[in-house]
Image: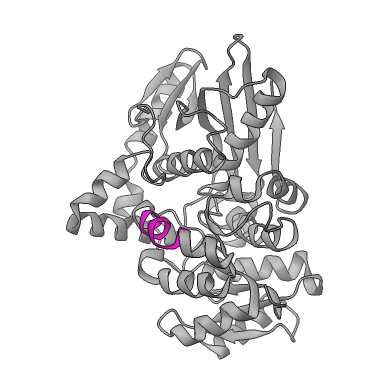
Amino acid sequence: MNARTYDVVVFGATGFTGRLVAEYLAAEYGSDVRWAMAGRSADKLAAVRDEIGAPADTPLIVADSADPASLKAMAEATAAVVTTVGPYQLYGEPLIKACVEAGTDYVDLCGEPAWMYDIIRNYDAPAKASGARIVLSCGFDSIPFDLGVYFLQQHAIEKTGAPLARVKGRVRKMKGTFSGGTAASFAETMARAAKEPEVINRLRNPFSLVPDFEGPKQPSGMKVIFEDDLNTWSAPFIMASINTKNVHRSNALLGHRYGEDFVYDEMFATGPGENGEQFANMIANDKSMAENPPKPGEGPSKEERETGFYDAMFTGVAADGTRLTAGVSGDKDPGYGSTSKMIAESALCLVKNVDREQTPGGVYTPAPAMGEALIGRLQEHAGLTFQIES
């Protein structure tokens, strides 16, 4: 790659989440990272720059998803692009095309499996040829879960010599809201599915992001259950549909390090007893995401973001009967505060910590693209904790 003017450009910096990404880079790294803010309006970019306290000389780039020439110029000027401009199935492909052609690294917050299927099919080979690392789903969906499974499996291999054939991902605690972008992406995916029946099959198939591979039957995770082995009631988890697909893609990209018969599911663990059962049923019957979703461009207050958190465990039983468990937690609300830090660190990890021999061009999920290097950055800078519990 030729020398680039910037390490990272934040595309969509005037949007709610993009603004948080820019604010994080300004506060955490200042002038230590060569970064720029990009969006459709120079005036709005300048206003956001001043409001978040970024340096007055922070570069501003005018670029628009509807203007391929502006995307090309932006992609050619930077080593990596962070994009928060979604739904990606409406606005994402032109930027991916520009990054692939320029050999520029790209990270997004995508949780739209039907669109991701198309991107993998259409851009994996060109990205391999150009050297662009296209890393999808670098927010709450799916970094804590993708890296949580990776972290646990590394521990299992080191301790027992073999991966765990069955892993359960269970959210133990969470305070915060899902983003308006997530809600808009969900609505757009459903609208597309209504017009294209094959999209429904991709949404249902846990291996739809792994071309030409079909693994074993996976648990549905769609009903309230009591899990004797964990002594808890568990409810459906709204992010499971995308997270499980990304975990299976990671497994494939890692050469099936977790095994070709790997089984994985995610649910929300609500605890034992009557209270646990009631909480599980309340989660299962919650329709707020469909009936009253947050709007794109809106989000929680700073206080709400600061007081949010999440905690998930990943657990499985080794061949010798030993239960192994890892925990992953975040110190801000999942949809905004933590997500904005995770995507920023993902871009910096690609640029600063992951060479192209280790991770050549292609369309990736976070774990095979960045692995331990990203876990290290997230723990050092972004308020995440990865811990082996047993």
Q: Main secondary structure of the magenta part?
A: helix
Can you see residue 10?
Answer: yes
In this rendered view, identify the residue nearer to me: 358 or 367: 358
Magenta stretch encompasses residue 46: no
Q: Is residue 293 visible?
A: no
Which residue extends farthest top? 320
Q: Quadrant of the C terminus?
A: top right
* Residue displayed at 75% across by 67% down: 27
- The quadrant in which the N terminus is found is bottom right
Q: Nearer the viewer, residue 369 or 183?
A: 369
Q: Which color mode does the image show?
A: one colour
Q: Position of residue 318 (x, y in %)?
A: 59, 16
Position of 302 relative to 56 (above/below): above
Q: Is residue 50 above or below residue 139?
A: below
Report x, y in % for residue 282: 37, 33
Q: Which residues are magenta?
A: 116-124
- Residue at image position (58%, 30%) is 313
Q: Is residue 304 left or right of residue 197?
A: right
For the view shown, which residue lies furthest in the right direction? 32
Q: Position of residue 353 (x, y in %)?
A: 74, 56
Residue 370 at x, y percent in the picture:
65, 50
Q: Is residue 121 magenta?
A: yes
